[in-house]
């Protein structure tokens, strides 16, 4: 059992969940449209990504299963396999297995063994035509042979080789050695990608793909070269075609290179991809060797003596002294004639290394030790191996010159160890880089934006941000109140205007700020809804029912946390609709209905609430059956049952332990569900309503509050008391006299063809009747047909509404309280509590 | 992409990617004689297709000068315009 790195695991699991949801959605579509090649490609890409990211995380069991299904899709892509309902079911089994592993991983931090899924893998393999039944074809064996020692490295441009060299020198000594200690062995690879001209037409950018792959696998690019020698003439040049071969040198953990190869498979159809590794500096230069002058025996003895002398230790004195000693050593070696032609290169290389690690004495002494060992090896080696060690003098000179140029800026060399993105910071300084005729090498930067535009933020930080924004609004309201008081005292009109302008600007910025903060938390319901498709399919098959599942209003947004918690309650509602609501095709036919039942999951927004309706066109709720079950389970007495109206009977369904199902099945009937639904929704600040018509169907409406930082509130006055009404609940404001004129009883008015229920706010609040005359009063017409009579309107304010807590939490009449700019607390009325009934589709 | 030619300076802002290269290349071809410098200060996104266009420009005008903030140049990333 191998624990997976926590950071890797978290991001992998998040990605896996998203991808598995997408896969299920696509599989459902594929079942309906088995010939849709785009769907097949999308599924292939999703499994491919899953395989890649699980490989990065080190989730091998997951990776193996994902790989098998990817293979299956590859066969489908090549038309070697036909999409059937059974095959789709097999894919669903695969996604179930992957989900199971993901859950296991999330709980335990390590994977279950692959053994559990041997049967599934066998089933996959037998589905592939011509594939052996034995458990061969292990995915991690497939790419090994593609990695070879890179031929002809010395033919690459010198500057490329130099940057690779710097990387090897810098990292091999300081950084990579440390990483090696963690048993994650790294290696320097060279990747050559030679694309066909049509690669851009496939929407692929090989460079970006390679860089992304390397980066996501934790690799580090050492050098990148784009070879321009294949560019055509101006007349033939088409900017939308690709003419540039790419060569990349990068360092990466050896065990991750396979995953990178899989990542690059997308390019394989249109590109030659060569991958090799560099294990020795000399591979970069030695093939240029023109002339080898081997040391004479006498020279070798002298060299041995030199290497064995005691002054190889670097003194403890200051840095300068240490450098001088080191250079003296190098120069003493250079006095050997054969070194002039052969070892010179190595001296230079080691000097280059020395530059980069000069800061640490420990490293320096290690370097000296290496140097000494190298000389001894050199002196003691036979002629053949010496030849292998000798580097060309020409190359050495180039290296030396290159290092000389950069001698002034050791930091610049160190840039090579910086992260790919770090170098793209903006600066106001400018420099010019000129190309020289004939030998036009132009350094143009690493302006490659690899990251997406989204980032993950700790939800507590967002909550803190919301709290701060609420506080800011309270402070602003207080300021507004003081400004108004000030304006009454100051007569300077210009100052008035200036203050007003400033106040408006502040209000505007705060409003935008709060909208932005709210949007951080919001997410459309689409993703939640899509998770039900697979479930409905499977349950419908199990129950022998035919169901058409329809989603509406998926773009409606809700707080992300609420959406996450809605899954279970909605699943219960859908399960009930499938099991209890919808009839079998035969029963439906008998009733004269379409044999396929309809299940609609519909989201909509009204004012400050979001409705989610689960609507079925099934048999409806049998109220008599509900009553009898409740009596049978001793939830109510016979007398109580007799007194109940329809709505009250329906509410019995929400009682703990209630179920009308005759038998307990894995789908429903255990008597848990609706009470859990109600409980969860109450925790979310919402509630659930039921509406049912026999043989027409049932609608279960989930009502949830919208997350709002501030609520625009209309402050009205009645009998000297101030009360707030959310502006979003208003339809219009009219004169009270006008409304009453259309009312025969004073309680119901018909205005413009609409029936209004007229209520005096004073009587609702239980305060003394107003002394205002009717013609002075206002009628506040709310959505849903309620008309409130108030004395006057005081103001409209943006307020932070806090829910009532403690004993007051049960007061349905109020939405909450808010602190106004003048410091007074205002009660906000819950207009939904004034309505008599909601409207439903049935 | 936001590409602008003023007083011989070709300023390429925001991006030079496959979506932009056709327009960029047409502009370069039409005004080749005028272009003296290429200002990449505002460039934030460059892909292979974009590099290709810049490389062609270098091929056509080998004395052209590129202007960019020094911090944006990373010695690990080098573009070659010859068989060097």
Image (cartoon, rainbow, N blue to C red):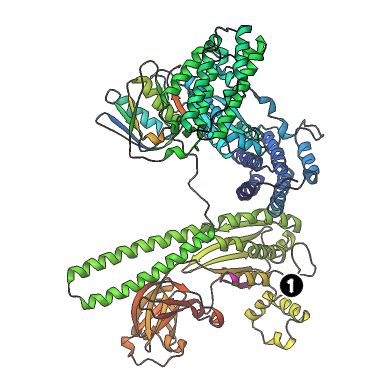
Please report the residue visible at 38 percent of the width from the left and 40 percent of the height from the top.
A426
| In-front residue for pair A412/A642 | A412
Describe residue A656's horizontal placement relative to residue B61 as left or right.
right
- The answer to whether A788 appears left or right of A492 in the picture is right
- Regarding residue A711, the answer to whether it shows in the image is yes
Q: Is residue A24 above or below residue A203?
A: below
Residue A352 % position (x, y): 50, 25
Question: Residue A419 colored magenta?
Answer: no
In the rendered image, which quarter is residue A788 located in? bottom left
Q: Which residue is mark 1?
A: A659
Q: Which residues are magenta?
A: A683-691
Subunit under mark 1: A
Q: How many marks?
A: 1
Q: Residue at x 53, y 19 (%)?
A: A347
- Viewer-proximal residue, A240 or A256? A256
Left or right of A357 in this view: A729: left
Give the percent coordinates (x, y) of residue A339: 55, 12
**Looking at the picture, does residue B78 appear above or below residue A621?**
above
**Residue A289 visible within the image:** no
For the residue pair B12 and A789, the one nearer the viewer reads as B12
């Amino acid at each position: 059992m191998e624990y997976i790195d926590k950071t890797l695991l978290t991001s992998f699991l998040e990605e896996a969940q998203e991808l598995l949801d997408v896969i299920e959605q696509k599989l459902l579509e594929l079942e309906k449209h088995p010939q849709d090649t785009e769907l097949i490609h999308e599924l292939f890409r999703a499994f491919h990504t899953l395989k890649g990211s699980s490989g990065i995380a080190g989730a091998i069991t997951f990776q193996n299963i994902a790989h098998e299904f990817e293979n299956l899709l590859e066969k489908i892509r090549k038309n070697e396999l036909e999409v059937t309902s059974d095959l789709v079911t097999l894919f669903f089994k695969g996604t179930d297995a992957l989900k199971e592993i993901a859950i296991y991983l999330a709980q335990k931090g390590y994977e279950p063994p692959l053994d559990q899924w041997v049967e599934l893998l066998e089933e996959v393999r037998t589905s592939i035509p011509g594939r052996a039944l034995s458990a061969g074809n292990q995915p991690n064996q497939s790419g090994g042979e593609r990695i070879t020692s890179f031929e002809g490295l010395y033919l690459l441009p010198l500057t490329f080789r130099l940057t690779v060299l710097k990387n090897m020198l810098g990292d091999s000594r300081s950084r990579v050695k440390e990483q090696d200690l963690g048993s994650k062995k790294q290696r320097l690879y060279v990747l050559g990608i030679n694309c066909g001209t049509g690669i851009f037409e496939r929407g692929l950018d090989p460079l970006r793909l390679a860089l992304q792959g390397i980066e996501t696998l934790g690799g580090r690019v050492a050098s990148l070269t784009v070879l321009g020698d294949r560019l055509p003439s101006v007349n033939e040049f088409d900017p939308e075609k690709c003419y540039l071969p790419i060569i990349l040198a990068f360092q990466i953990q050896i065990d991750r290179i396979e995953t990178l190869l899989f990542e690059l498979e997308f390019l394989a159809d249109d590109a030659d991809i060569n991958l090799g590794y560099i294990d020795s500096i000399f591979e970069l230069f030695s093939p240029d060797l023109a002339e080898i002058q081997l040391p004479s025996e006498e020279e070798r003895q002298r060299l041995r003596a030199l290497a064995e002398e005691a002054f190889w230790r670097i003194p403890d004195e200051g840095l300068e002294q240490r450098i001088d000693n080191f250079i003296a050593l190098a120069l003493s070696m250079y006095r050997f004639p054969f070194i002039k032609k052969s070892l010179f290169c190595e001296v230079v290389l080691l000097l280059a290394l020395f530059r980069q690690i000069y800061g640490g004495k420990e490293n320096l002494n290690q370097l000296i030790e290496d140097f000494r060992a190298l000389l001894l090896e050199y002196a003691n080696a036979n002629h053949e191996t010496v030849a292998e060690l000798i580097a060309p003098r020409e190359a050495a000179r180039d290296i030396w010159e290159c290092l000389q140029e950069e001698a002034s800026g050791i930091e610049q060399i160190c840039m090579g160890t910086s992260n790919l993105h770090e170098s793209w910071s903006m600066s106001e300084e400018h420099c010019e880089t000129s190309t020289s005729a004939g030998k036009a090498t132009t350094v143009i930067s690493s302006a490659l934006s690899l990251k997406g535009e989204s980032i993950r933020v700790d939800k507590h930080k967002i909550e803190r941000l919301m709290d701060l924004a609420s506080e800011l609004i309270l402070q602003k309201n207080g300021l507004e109140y003081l400004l108004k008081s000030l304006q009454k005292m100051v007569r300077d009109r210009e100052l008035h205007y200036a203050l007003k302008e400033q106040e408006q600007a502040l209000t505007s910025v705060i409003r935008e700020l709060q909208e932005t903060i709210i949007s951080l938390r919001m997410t459309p319901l689409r993703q939640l809804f899509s998770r039900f498709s697979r479930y409905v399919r499977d349950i419908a098959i199990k129950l022998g029912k035919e169901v058409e599942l329809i989603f509406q209003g998926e773009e409606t947004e809700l707080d992300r946390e609420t959406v996450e918690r809605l899954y279970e309650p909605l699943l219960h509602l859908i399960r009930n609709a499938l099991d209890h609501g919808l009839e079998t095709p035969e029963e439906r036919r008998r009733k004269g209905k379409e044999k396929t039942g309809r299940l609609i999951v519909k989201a909509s927004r009204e004012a400050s609430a979001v409705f989610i309706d689960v609507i079925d066109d099934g048999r409806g709720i049998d109220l008599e059956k509900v009553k009898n079950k409740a009596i049978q389970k001793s939830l109510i007495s016979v007398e109580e049952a007799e007194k109940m109206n329809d709505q009250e009977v329906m509410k019995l369904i929400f009682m703990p332990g209630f179920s009308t199902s005759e038998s307990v099945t894995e789908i429903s009937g255990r008597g848990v569900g609706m009470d859990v639904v109600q409980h969860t929704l109450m925790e979310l600040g919402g509630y659930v309503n039921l509406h049912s018509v026999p043989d027409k169907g049932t609608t279960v409406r989930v009502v949830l509050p919208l997350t709002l930082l501030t609520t625009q509130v209309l402050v009205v006055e009645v009998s000297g008391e101030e009360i707030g009404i959310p502006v979003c609940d208003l339809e219009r404001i009219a004169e009270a006299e006008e409304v009453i004129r259309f009312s025969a009883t004073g309680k119901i008015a018909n205005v413009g063809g609409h029936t209004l229920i007229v209520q005096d706010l004073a009587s609702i609040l239980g305060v003394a009747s107003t002394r205002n005359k009717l013609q002075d009063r206002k009628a506040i017409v709310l959505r849903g047909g309620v008309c409130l009579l108030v004395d006057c309107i005081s103001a409209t304010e943006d307020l932070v509404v806090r829910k009532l807590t403690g004993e007051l939490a049960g007061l349905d009449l109020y939405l909450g309280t808010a602190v106004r700019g003048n410091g007074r607390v205002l009660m906000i009325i819950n207009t939904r509590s004034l309505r008599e009934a909601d409207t439903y589709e049935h | 992409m936001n590409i602008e030619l003023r007083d011989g300076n070709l300023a390429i802002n925001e991006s030079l990617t496959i979506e932009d290269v056709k327009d960029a290349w047409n502009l370069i071809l039409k005004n080749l004689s005028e272009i003296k410098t290429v200002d990449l200060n505002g460039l934030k996104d460059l892909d292979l297709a974009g590099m290709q266009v810049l490389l062609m420009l270098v091929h056509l005008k080998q004395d052209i000068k590129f202007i960019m903030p020094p911090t944006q140049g990373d010695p690990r990333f080098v573009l070659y315009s010859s068989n060097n």
